[in-house]
Amino acid sequence: MSENTAETARPAPIPVTILTGFLGSGKTTLLNRILAENHGEKIAVIENEFGEVGIDNELLLSADDQIVAMNNGCICCTVRGDLVRILGELVAKRDAGELAFDRVLIETTGLAEPAPVAQTFFVDETVATRYLLDAVVTLVDAVHAGRQLDEHEAAQAQVGFADRLLLSKTELVDGEHLNALQERLAAMNPRARQLAVHFGEMPLAEILDIRGFNLNAALEIDSAFLAGAHHHHDDRIGSVVFRAERDFDGAKLQDFIGSIVRVFGDDLMRYKGVLAVDQLPYRVILQGVHQLMGASPGQPWAEAARVSTLVFIGRDLPRDILLTGLQQCLK
């Protein structure tokens, strides 16, 4: 490798996990367990609270990890510019050898919707170049989630945006209550795996490097939950799942998805698909966040059955328009 090539080589992006969940769901408990775990990694933590005086950062077991507290508002709105600035400062200090960290965890306030935080990693060029958004992990309080989901749209948004749902306090509810909650969560977000977490105890492999925002990651939907779900709640956040054994017409699909994103993009929180497109020998991986959308080639179909699966998660989704439009895009 020439000296010039070495100088211009781009460093590997730093993985980022967004940790969210409504007030009292156990985010700080989980974060403490992660920081105390003997995993051999240095973690930079960006921790934000609603209010001007930090509290949770005083509870964190900082050890050698770098902790940055943002206390002047909700991360999803008033301090979004600060998030870009702090991410820039962290990577600059890392490049200069002043800080050493392997990944970043962002703990949002319990009142925050995670979408604007996630969008930061796509709309800011510097952040997008140096960081890789791995996943959104959402804590759900099994005792109080029903009421929180009924009364707070932010709680619904946190569920809808999740790549992983961690249910806390499950030991405090009976089986019937827990099953009903799991069915409700699955109806809202069928693509997020649900796991019980007990006082922050969770294998790191279930939280870190799970590739929730990776376009080449597999689309997994828990069909068992969907088959048994009886969804009687008036949740604004919901999901629409489309499956087909016929190939898509690529041009028609592109036009339809483009029009859906233009009209309904503000309410489309997450959408992702593994698609069979006519005349293409490989899977097409589609993923979007609101109006931000991307597609990339996946694994070859080879001898596998060419079956498409596409899931939309969002607010007040136009189910009939989505299902009818996608059906009309098939060959």
Image: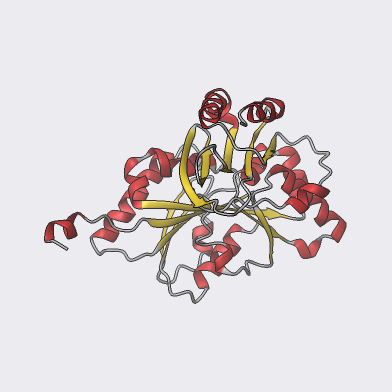
State the quadrant of the N terminus.
bottom left
Q: Residue at x 75, y 55 (%)?
A: 142
Name the quarter where the C terminus is drawn.
top right
**Residue 112 appears anywhere in the view:** no
The colour scheme is secondary structure
Q: Please identify the quarter of the rendering in which residue 4 is found.
A: bottom left
Given residues 285 and 59, the one toward you in this image is 285
Q: Residue furthest left?
A: 3
Q: Position of residue 109 (x, y in %)?
A: 55, 48
- Number of labelled discs? 0
The vertical placement of 76 against 10, above or below, is above
State whether residue 151 appears in this view. Answer: yes
Identify which residue, 161 or 25, lies in the foreground.
161
Q: Position of residue 127 (x, y in %)?
A: 36, 46
Q: Residue at x 50, y 41 (%)?
A: 280
Measured from the top left, where is residue 158 in percent x and y? 62, 45
Identify the residue shown where x is 41% and y is 68%: 42
Quarter-wise, where is residue 95 in the image? bottom left
Q: Is residue 79 above or below residue 5?
A: above
Left or right for 244, reference 263: right
- Viewer-closest of 223 and 204: 223
Q: Position of residue 308 (x, y in %)?
A: 62, 43
